[in-house]
Structures are given as structure tokens and as C-alpha cells.
Image (cartoon, rainbow, N blue to C red):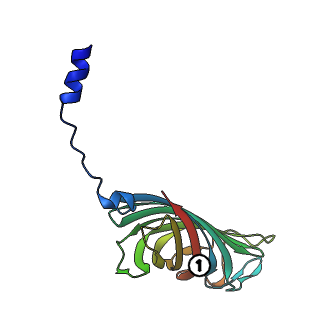
Amino acid sequence: MNALILALMLQEPPEVVPVPAEFGTHAHSLIDVRAGVGVLLLDGFQADTPLGTREIESDPLALASLELGLDWEGWGISLGGAVAGTGDVQARLGWLRLATPALLELPVALRVSAGPVAGTLDIDASGFGDFEPGLGFLARVSLETRRESPLTLALWVDALALEFDYDEPTLSGDKGVGSFGLAVGLSAGLRF
């Protein structure tokens, strides 16, 4: 037993390999969870149907969103969803966004992302009719806290190319809602 202790004491200590600085600052990879609020702007709708005129004003819709994202070496992918509505109009959106590394690194980072978006539009008015689900494209520009921060804050603008076709017979007027929409908002979250 004493020989074993003596052999361990005479052995050279193991080499210590330093941990790269980026692992301590979240620069390598991270996961973030974000919640946001904003406003969604869609075109109005007016159509004459066999049952009368159907109309939606182009009022801003209050929006609440939730996103889960993964960053790897600055590139990002996010899966998210939102609910927007006011009064009788409700929209539900879901998206997958791919993000570039920061285009500008100051106290905040400027990032651009884009990807497919899908959604539904529901009108809670008796006899109004239905809209078909829509599939389109979303592009986002955001100013957000740098990746090194465990807390993420972002100000963003989304441009949506998304249309919801009216699923009822029309005599004249619009055939759907959308084609181009904007959403503006703030989000906050945590990075792991």
C-alpha cells in the first residue's frame, strides 16, 4: 500500500487544458426562449356574397408570441407561434425562421432572419363564413442584445407575405385577406 502511495506522489501532475473563453460567454452555442408582444397589420376585406356583404376593417391586431431558438456559431433557427386578435378577428401564426449572424455588433446586434409561415384566420361573427389556412413567407429584422448576455431583449419588425383565401362563394369584391402584412413588437427571453 505504501508503495502505491509513493508511486502516486512521484507521478507528474496531469496537464491542465484551459477552457476556451467562448464557452464561458455563450459565444459557441445557445438555446433561447422568447415571449413577445406586438401589433399585426393585415389588409381589410370586403366581399359581396349570396348572403350579403362581408367586411373586415384593416385595424391593427394585438399580438402575443412565443419562440424557441437555437444558435450555433452565430447562425440561428427559431420555431415560433403567435396569436393576434381584436374583437371578432383572430389570427394564429406559426413559423420557422433561419437567422444570420449579427450584421452589426454594437451594444446591440442587428440580425436578419426569414422562413416559412403558416396560419389561420377566424371571424367570430354569425354567418360570416370561413377562411382557408394560409401559407407564406416571413422576414424579420431585429435589434437585440448581444449573444453574450443571458437575457435577451429584442425590438423587431416582421414582413409577412401571407394570404387567407375566403372559403365561401362571392359575387364581387375581395377573394381573401392578406397578401402583405407587417408585425412590430418587443420580445424578452432567456439564453441557456
Q: Residue at x 19, y 23 (%)?
A: 7
Q: Position of residue 161 (x, y in %)?
A: 49, 78
Residue 132 in sight here: no
Residue at figure coordinates x 81%, y 70% from the top left: 126
Question: SS for tag 1?
Answer: strand
Residue 130 visible in the picture: yes
Tell me the kind of residue under disc 1: Gly
x and y percent of residue 107 in the render? 44, 81
x and y percent of residue 171 in the render?
Answer: 66, 82
The residue most toward the top is 1
Quadrant of the rendering where the N terminus is positioned: top left
138 and 20: which is toward the camera: 20
In the picture shown, does residue 51 fall above or below 13? below
Q: How many marks?
A: 1
182 vs 141, left or right, is right
What residue is at 47 percent from the left and 67 percent from the top?
149
- Which residue of the protein is positioned furthest toward the right in this rendering? 126
Residue at 35% over, 72% down: 100
Q: Residues within 10 Å of mark 1 (few under 14, many from 20)?
A: some
**Quadrant in which residue 131 is drawn:** bottom right
Q: Residue 178: x percent and y percent?
A: 57, 80
Horizontal placement of 177 versus 69: left or right? right
Along the line of sight, the residue nearer the viewer: 156 or 20: 20
Left or right of 76 in this view: 143: right
**Residue that mark 1 sits on:** 185
Q: 90 or 75: nearer the eye?
A: 75
